[in-house]
Amino acid sequence: MPAIVRPVGDERDALLTFLAQQRYVVRLAAHGLTDEQAALAPTVSDLSIGDVLAHLTTVERSWTAAIVGGPGASSPDRQFALADVLGAYEQATAETDDAIAAVGTLDQPVPVPAGARWAPPDVEGWSVRWVLLHLIQETARHAGHADIIRESIDGATALPLMAAVEQWPPRRTIQPWTPGTTAPR
C-alpha cells in the first residue's frame, strides 16, 4: 500500500480506504520485531506495540459487535506471540469490513454498547458513518503511538518500514529499514 491513499470513489470507499491505510501503518510498526521486542514498553506509556495491536483488535471487535448487534469483545491477555496478535488484528479488521459491507446505509443507527462508561450520557447511539470515523481516529492515534514505541526500540519509523515491506529502492530521503540498523537521529 503506498504512503498516500489512492483516489477514492464514494463516501464508504473513502472511509474504508483511509481506515485501511491507518491499519496498515499500525501493522508496519511490528514489522521485523521479535516477540520480546513487541512486548517492550520503552516509553513513558506502559503499552508495547503488541499491546497497541491487542487494544485495536478489541476496539474493532467491540464496534463490529455494536453494528451487528452481537456481544462485546473482551480484552486479550497481555502475554502474547506477535504473530498471534497480528493474526487476531487481521481477523478483527476483516470482520469489521464484512459488517460494513453488509450495511445498506452509513446512516444505520448503532446503539451505544450497554454499560459504556465512556459514552456521553445523553447519546443513545451513532451512525455507522460515525463508527467508521471513530475507528479512523482511534487507529490513527495508536498508529502514531506505535510509531513512537517502535522508534524507541530500534530507531525505525513508518516510512523506512514501509519502504522495506514494499521493497522501495533506496532514496536520498528514505532508506528502507533493515534488521539490525537504526535510523539516523
Image (cartoon, rainbow, N blue to C red):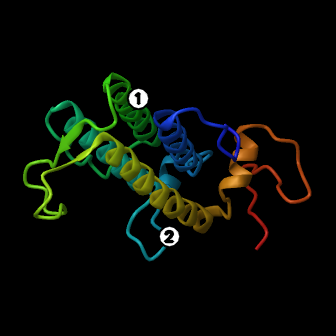
What kind of residue is marked 1?
A: Ala
Residue at the disc numbered 2: 42
Q: What secondary structure is marked by label 1?
A: helix
Measured as percent of width and height from the top left, residue 60 is found at 33, 42
Q: In the displayed structure, does residue 115 sit left or right of residue 163?
A: left
Crowding near the residue tagged with mark 1, few <14, some 14–19, many ≥20 C-alpha atoms within 10 Å: few
- Residue pictured at 90% horizontal, 52% vertical: 171
Q: Which mark is residue 94?
A: 1
Q: In the displayed structure, does residue 64 sit left or right of residue 173?
A: left
Q: Which mark is residue 105?
A: none
Q: In the displayed structure, does residue 65 sit left or right of residue 128?
A: left
Measured as percent of width and height from the top left, residue 87 is found at 43, 33
Q: Nearer the viewer, residue 154 or 65?
A: 65
Front label number (1 vs 2): 1
Q: Is residue 98 above or below residue 114?
A: above
Q: Quadrant of residue 121?
A: bottom left
Q: Quadrant of the N terminus?
A: top right
Which residue reaches farthest bottom? Answer: 44
Measured as percent of width and height from the top left, residue 127 is found at 27, 44
Which residue reaches farthest right? Answer: 172
Q: In the displayed structure, does residue 53 sit left or right of residue 108?
A: right
Q: What secondary structure is marked by label 2?
A: loop
- Residue pictured at 34% horizontal, 36% vertical: 106
Q: Nearer the viewer, residue 122 or 95?
A: 122
What kind of residue is marked 2?
A: Pro
- Residue pictured at 46% horizontal, 61% vertical: 141
Measured as percent of width and height from the top left, residue 52 is found at 41, 55
